Image: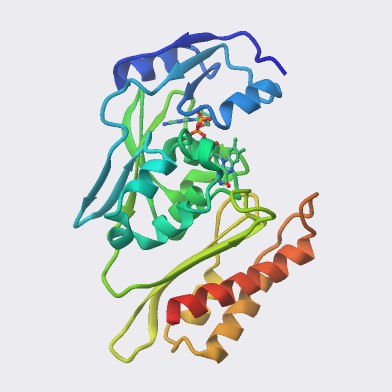
Amino acid sequence: MKLPAFEYASPATLAEAVSLLASHEGDAKAIAGGQSLMPMMAFRVAQPSLLVDLRKIPGLNQIKISKDGVSLGALVRWRDIEDDARLQQAHPLLAAAIEHVAHYQVRNRGTVGGSVAHADPAAEMPGIAMACDAEIMVTGKSGTRSIKAADFFVAALTTALEPDEIITEVRLPAWPQGRRWGFQEFARRRGDFAMSGIALFYDLDASGKATNAHVGAIGVGDRPLRLGAVEAVLNGRVIDEATIEKASQAASAAVDPPDDIHASAAYRRALTGTLVERALRSASA
Ligand SMILES: Cc1cc2nc3c(=O)[nH]c(=O)nc-3n(C[C@H](O)[C@H](O)[C@H](O)COP(=O)(O)OP(=O)(O)OC[C@H]3O[C@@H](n4cnc5c(N)ncnc54)[C@H](O)[C@@H]3O)c2cc1C
């Protein structure tokens, strides 16, 4: 289908971009790589009168690694994450998850900010943001604010962003050495959206028991989820076969996934348990 008519602006500064979005009272949209917005416009799911292209705004395409963690600029593409060898050490869970995003062409254009703003419940980056307690930095006409991932994702394709706000950065807290982690997802074909996906990590205390367990799930709810019931099973326990079995059962019980053309709810529920099991086996190996 052809796109509906729209105006186009390519501002050189963040302030100009915010002011363009604000001046259209919710009828303008930011565009990054266009990988979700263009199809949505073609299908008339979105019909903005103005597209504000973010690509000329300086500084939004950087990956910064410091003692505080990893900062991903909103215009960082999946390809940039894949190419940055530092991330294998600085955030191996992120690096592993992003390997599963889409196909070659989409990976060259799709961005961190676009994915987080689009808020597809099956997308990997929102899942990592939830699992890792990311902070999402946004700038709008009222200034800059930081939104915790848990408050950011409201429902499918719905976030806490105001219409004039632009995501500038996603901050992931520092990743300590020795942390155990696992990422597992299942899709019909590699690069498709996940029917279910699990991103988890935990640290080990002096007695070898898990602490600080974080378990995130994608593709099984109306937003990326944290599975608190599974975290409760893991914390304070040695990750042995008995704990893995309990955690897997807790994961299946914790989710209430949708039925759709790709898979039934029952299949997704069972799959989620299996993926927790696989992720824990790889984390504890
Ligand atoms: C065939 C195909 C397969 C895909 N498979 C996967 C997959 O397996 N996993 C996955 O996670 N994703 C997948 N995607 C999505 C892809 O990874 C893109 O990252 C995602 O579509 C966002 O695209 P984009 O960055 O180009 O944002 P755009 O399409 O430009 O924008 C998307 C939305 O975000 C808003 N937006 C963009 N940037 C900002 C910003 N900085 N601040 C505020 N709002 C902003 C836009 O207004 C729009 O509403 C797939 C896409 C395609 C086309």
For the point 39% across and 23% down, the residue is: 54
Up the image or down, 57 lies above or below 191; here it is above
Q: Nearer the viewer, residue 24 or 31?
A: 31
Q: Nearer the viewer, residue 238 or 271?
A: 271
Q: Is residue 237 something that shows in the picture?
A: yes
Residue 209 image position (x, y, % from top left): 38, 87
Residue 32 image position (x, y, % from top left): 45, 27
For the point 47% across and 23% down, the residue is: 30
Is residue 56 toward the left or the right of residue 106 in the image? left
For the point 60% across and 70% down, the residue is: 275
Q: Residue furthest front?
A: 104
Q: Quadrant of the C terminus?
A: bottom left
Residue 13 image position (x, y, % from top left): 29, 18
Q: Residue furthest left?
A: 67
Is residue 170 toward the left or the right of residue 29 in the image? left
Q: Is residue 215 something that shows in the picture?
A: no
Residue 258 image position (x, y, % from top left): 74, 54
